[in-house]
Image (cartoon, rainbow, N blue to C red):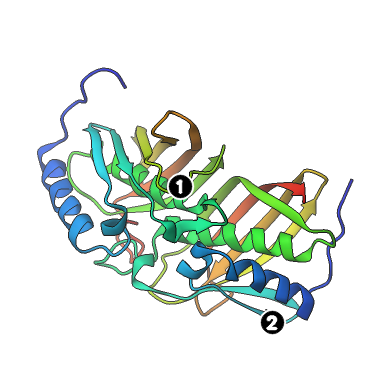
Amino acid sequence: MRRDLLDVSEETLARARALVEGSNIGAWFGTRISIENGEQRYRLTFDEPHIGNPVIRALHGGVISAFLQYAATLEVLSRTPEPLRARSISVHTSYLRGSRDVDLDVAVSVQRVGRRIAFVEARGWQGDREREVASAQIALRVFEE
Amino acid sequence: MTDAPQPLAPGIAMAFQGIQAAFTKEHPLFSELAPKPLRVGRGEIAVRVTPSERFLDGDTIHPGLMTILLDTIMGMATWSDLETFQPLATINLQTDTYTHAKPGENIVCEAICEGIMDDVSIVRGKATSEDGTLLATAAGTFMVGTRSAQVSRI
């Protein structure tokens, strides 16, 4: 069984934003969501606790991976027609380039949402989308509410 | 990990003292998490962390925090296996989540560096709650001796 996704719209955007409003970690990431070129765009708003190495002021790799995972979950939960719950199963992140102490933008591509499992890819960049700093393959266990 | 840990190389032991001081006093994320070392040896690290409510997503701790903790401690496990201190960069990291941590519950994070070949370390990690419940496992690779801006995650 495959679950179809809703097209990105003001309604799916509102659903994603509502999920962030109830989440402490969503606030910790400084999560901002918008629609750009027909896709939902997730922004990690840079803040000092997101730093890994204070000497070179790069984002912490774990913070990057955690935000990719967070954005992937929001994308799935905001775009399925029926309300779902989701739990992370696995996140496999590749760190493609060094990061800097600025915002991270993320776009999510949902590959398949089955009855129990969703497969998602999330990609993050800082300024230049052609120069991604990280990408992640993510699997979620989904449950009907 | 029941045997006594093997001692760190002297340069690494000194570097770890500096890192611990920086973590507990200056780093805005890790000073809040206040990691307590439980075991520090050659190629192996274990720490205990008490996550704050800042990392809640609903009623439980967001699993992204496990990724943050495991990336950190797995990098440290790589350092602990070196003779001299060198910058690190995470190449890739896979975190598999078993269940979510509850707020106020201590988390034990362990990492073992399996080996370093051609400047690439292979590391595995595990997070459990203090009662022994598995929270997450991780496997990662790290580049040792990076010269670009992409150096250590710590």
Residue type pointed to by label 1 = Met
Q: Is residue B1 above or below residue B51?
A: above
The residue labelled by disc 1 is B66
The residue labelled by disc 2 is A36
Both labels 1 and 2 in a single chain:
no
Q: Is residue B109 above or below residue B52?
A: above
The residue closer to the viewer here, B144 or B135, is B135
Position of the N terminus of chain A by quadrant: top right
- Residue visible at 36% across and 37% down in the picture: B108
- Residue visible at 39% across and 48% down in the picture: B69
- Residue visible at 55% across and 64% down in the picture: A23
Q: Inspect this view and state whether residue A9 appears.
A: no
The residue closer to the viewer here, B149 or A80, is A80
Question: Quadrant location of residue B84?
Answer: top left
Q: Is residue A12 above or below residue A94?
A: below
Question: Quadrant location of residue B120?
Answer: top left
**Other residues around mark 1 within 10 Å, as few (<14) / some (14–19) / many (≥20):** many
Whole-percent x, y for residue B44 in the image: 29, 33
Comparing marks 1 and 2, which lies closer to the viewer? Answer: 1
Left or right, A120 with respect to A60, comes to right
Left or right, B53 with respect to B77, comes to right
Whole-percent x, y for residue B134 in the image: 49, 32
